[in-house]
Image (tube, grey):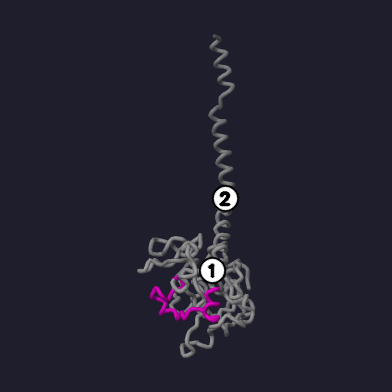
Amino acid sequence: MNKSGYRNRFSIAGFTLIELLVVIAIIALLMGILMPALTRVKSLAKGAACQSNMHQWGVIWMTYAQDNEGHFQRGAGGESQTGGGRWPAVVRDYYKDDKIRLCPMAVKPLTEGGLNPLAAWGKFDDGMYASYGFNEWLCNRPVSEGESSNYWRHVFGVPQSNTVPLFLDCYWYDVWVHSIDSPPPTDGSTSDLAGRNEIRRVCLNRHSYTVNSVFLDWSVRKVDLKELWTLKWHKNYNIRDIWTRAGGVTEDDWPEWMRGLKDY
């Protein structure tokens, strides 16, 4: 056997160290290019799954209202500290799959280390947790209670019902928005919202600076974060207040993390 010929053929067929390093560099470059795209695709898929959940919740809430003469639950915030007053229990007979209570971007409860804005609320003593919230201004509260003139109470005959949020991405089980509520200083901040600034519960960067919402006409769509201040949260809500362009808000008024987002 011609050993020198064998060695020559082997050396021609093999890779040099430099060639291997070049191949590795190319693979690393491709991974660097593809990974952000794959991450974005994964995020978009979760956003689509969240919207699918919302469509199911639209049907659930529509059915619940029809079964209750057009009314939603009584609600009343603090009273919902008991498990029976929170929406997952209120509509328990209308859904079977507990997974639809969770936005796919926010499945880990706060009590298990979940961090806002990508966290579910709970778990409470009854084991309940979710990552969506109900617009408390839709609750059927007694006329004698505070700010009673703001409550919708009844789903029928509501003007421009496609602008009234019903159920949306939220890090608490309900949300009680006023037009002067200020935005969160940082994404997912839970500071200074005990009875005020509750819009911070839904102003979350879950879906590329949008949240998903069911509206009172049972439609589902994404809502830009600054757009939240222009929705008709309650009967007397001012859609042209200080956090809108009509109300004179400027780019510098917004916290840094929201500057550059589309204005409304």
Q: Quadrant of the C terminus?
A: bottom right
Query: Going by the image, does 217 lie left or right of 127?
Result: right
**Residue type at tag 1:** Trp
Mark 2 sits on what residue? 38
The residue drawn where x is 61% and y is 70% is: 219
Dot 2: element: helix
Q: Residue 53: which quarter of the image?
A: bottom right
Magenta region:
63-88
Q: Nearer the viewer, residue 85 or 14?
A: 85
**Residue type at tag 2:** Leu
Q: Quadrant of the N terminus?
A: top right
| The magenta stretch spans residue 218 | no
At which x and y percent is residue 69? 54, 81
In 3D space, how far apart are the residues under numbered discs 2 and 1 (Cα atoms)?
29 Å
At which x and y percent is residue 125? 35, 69
At which x and y percent is residue 188? 48, 67
Q: Residue furthest bottom?
A: 144
Is residue 10 something that shows in the picture? yes
Mark 1 sits on what residue? 57
Q: Nearer the viewer, residue 18 or 32?
A: 32
Q: Nearer the viewer, mark 2 or mark 1?
A: 1
The residue drawn where x is 41% and y is 75% is: 84
